[in-house]
Amino acid sequence: MKGLVLKSTGSWYLLLGEDNKRYQARIRGKLRLEGIKETNPVAVGDYVMFDIEGEEGIISDIVDRENYIARQSVKKTGHSHILAANVDQALLVVTLAFPRTSLGFIDRFIVSAESFRIPQVIVFNKSDLLTEEQQAEAEDLMKLYQRLDIRCLQTSATKADQPELEKLLQHKKTLISGHSGVGKSTLINQLSKNIQQKTSEISDFSAKGTHTTTFAEMFQLNEHTFIIDTPGIKELGLVNMEPEELSDYFVEMRALRSSCKFGGRCLHINEPKCAVREAVTNGAIAQSRYDSYLSMVRGDDNRK
């Protein structure tokens, strides 16, 4: 039988079968011996083939993925961790205050999704806590990313209704991610009375959130609408990306790449007659985006 992975706890998986029933399942041992460089060879959003043995399912095969979003494993060198597979869009919840999400982190998330041409959405949460200056910054950032064809909206997780967000999610599988403490779980709880993700307060000492979501989990809002909640991400290391290809995942740079003197070989750092650096100088490309690009191409450790 074919099934959709709704939840992964590392050794057990919750599957939604083709018969619309749910099954607890585990992986057949041989699947772990294929040299997969992933800490979670079966991820939420994967489609798998499984057999029913007694009261449990046994996963025998993984259906080829259409796409996935991954980050470098923080525990196992040389491995990646799949955040979710087979998604229609990737939604990042960010805040500009308590805790503040860095622009570098936002851009890393965008690059990770763009590398598989997964549409991105940025939700600027906690609008009720912003000062006038922070609100003006939020509006400027929304304009910046909207020019890149990234959908942006502003919310307050304290509001009971989220009609704009709900509309955005319909008939899609959506990965929802973000730092701990940005209000991601609170927003998700607003979407269905059947979802009760644990939430916590922000630490006054560190101004950061604590992890409340332990495992990735997919929730079904209606017959054709699914959302995937993931543990709060502290850092986002890019996976299997060479410096020469990074600018392809910055849409504003990709459009100019052929105009550089060295074309596809240009790293846009100090090469002569570089169209990208010229665009930064004249304001056509935002300085913050270029700074994020430089951080990634140089392999800086700051992933937050």
Image (cartoon, rainbow, N blue to C red):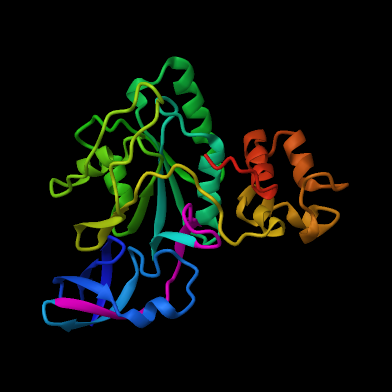
Give the camera-side residue of 147 and 254. 254
- Quadrant location of residue 41? bottom left
Give the camera-side residue of 84 and 126. 84
Q: In this rendering, does residue 205 appear at all?
A: yes
Q: How many numbered marks are there? A: 0
* On screen, residue 260 above or below 93: below
* On screen, residue 241 above or below 140: below
State left or right for residue 218 relative to residue 278. left
Q: Residue furthest left?
A: 55
Residue at the image position 30 percent from the left and 54 percent from the top: 215
Q: Is residue 200 magenta?
A: no
State left or right for residue 260 relative to residue 62. right
Query: Could you tell me residue 110's position as x and y percent?
Result: 52, 49
Residue at the image position 66 percent from the left and 38 percent from the top: 291
Q: Is residue 73 magenta?
A: yes
Q: Residue furthest top?
A: 132
Give the camera-side residue of 287 and 229. 229
Query: Could you tell me residue 120's position as x and y percent?
Result: 46, 50
State left or right for residue 74 relative to residue 278. left
Residue at the image position 45 percent from the left and 59 percent from the top: 81
Query: Could you tell me residue 298's position as x and y percent?
Result: 70, 47
Q: In this rendering, does residue 63 appear at all?
A: no
Query: Could you tell me residue 279's position as x and y percent?
Result: 74, 40
* On screen, residue 119 above or below 139: below
Where are the magenta residues, as a range?
56-79
